[in-house]
Image (spheres, rainbow, N blue to C red):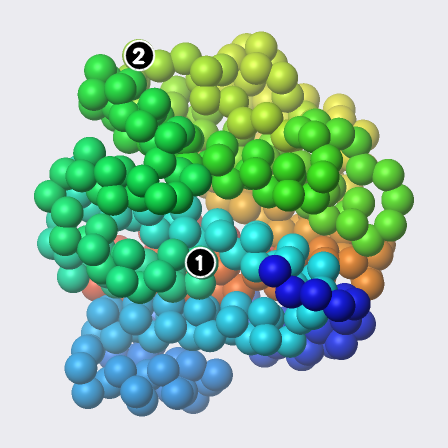
Amino acid sequence: MSAGASNPEYVNARVRSRRASLFADEDYRKLVRMGPSEIARFMEETEYEREINALGARFSGVDLIEYALNRNLAKHFQDLLDWSEGRLYDHIARYLRKFDVWNLKTIFRGIYTDTDAEEIRTDLIRAGELEDATIERLLETDSIEDAIEFLRATSYYEPLTVAYEEFEDHGALVPLENALDREFYENLLADISRGPGVEPQEGPEAKYVEFLQAEIDFRNIRNALRLARSGADLDPAAYYIDGGVLFDRADLGRLVGDYDALVDHIAENKRYGDRLSGALERLRDADSLIQFEHALDAALLEYADTLSSIYPTSVSAVLSYILAKEREVENIRAIARGREVGLDETEIEEELVIL
């Protein structure tokens, strides 16, 4: 943990510069018309030049694109930590643990589907706190049970051990993935000395809490919808993550099967309804679960942007940038993978989060 005063003005100025260099929606529309090698050449003319050149001798096609994306993402987020001091550093470092959760989920899915370790590795984002040696050891494990045992020294071990019993009963990864989400978000709120569900007051730290509450709300929606779609005999309310303001467990169980009622519930909440009018329309227009999930991603990004404009000296601008950078990486990855498997332009565009 760092000591000393925070420096949000300096960091936010650097973040604004980085945000301006992100791909525009028009760039994505260009990329969907390209093959993987053309996409890599396009990236070489952008801020991804260093990664493409460094990795080009070892990889090609989609592998080159994915490794370059993940290395660039990790570099940018390390820059955020290098720039930050004091309490701001602490907030960012703790938030970036979300990529430990991402990597653990990715490894569990890979073990579950018997995917080759090298293929799993291309999806990992080395931007959290787990050491590379730990991740590499996890990639060598043959079972989810062994992977969990290797995490004994981490805070994830106990909740994963409990969730593993339900995984064995139902054969679905949902209990394990939710245990990781719950451990991350609930600890993150506890780290800033506020109990789950506490309404933020005023000031820059309050905007951090408000952002986390929104992310928890939208994560609860996503998890419940995916669980309902899975067909597994699991109660969505049992996988509720404390800390949001939009639902309680009963709400989630009641609304998960009704998109229209779910959107109405979001719109009726003063916090979201007043700030997400455009995003709510996209949610209403979604005609598939994947489109609904992409609309949720866009809504969270729009909400983070709104918070950062309300209180520009808070950590919200940094969190908004992290989400926007993630969106860029995921969009480019989706385009490259879509082109590789022969999807047409319309099908690929449906996989993108475009505001």
- Viewer-nearest residue: 268 or 320: 320
> Against 102, is 262 above or below?
above
Q: Is residue 66 visible?
A: yes
Q: Residue at x 16, y 61 (%)?
A: 118
The label nearer to you, 2 versus 1, is: 1
Q: Distance between the residues labelled 2 and 1?
A: 34 Å
* Local secondary structure at mark 1: loop
> Against 228, is 88 above or below?
below
- The quadrant of the rendering that contains the N terminus is bottom right
Q: Which residue is drawn at 46% across and 84% down?
A: 46
Q: Mark 1 or mark 2, which is nearer the start of the sequence? A: 1
> Against 5, is 219 above or below?
above
For the view shown, which residue lies furthest in the right direction?
A: 202
* In this rendering, position of residue 20 left or right of residue 194: left
Q: Is residue 12 visible?
A: no
Q: Which residue is drawn at 32% across and 59% down?
A: 124
Q: Point out residue 166 in the picture as x, y percentages from the top left corner.
A: 29, 18
Q: Residue at x 53, y 64 (%)?
A: 325
- Viewer-nearest residue: 86 or 314: 86
Residue that carries the numbered disc 1 in the rendered image:
129
Residue that carries the numbered disc 2 in the rendered image:
233
* Mark 1 burial class by Cα count in 10 Å: few <14, some 14-19, many 20+: few
Amino acid type at image mark 1: Glu
* Local secondary structure at mark 2: loop
- Viewer-nearest residue: 202 or 187: 187
Q: Residue 229 carries which label?
A: none
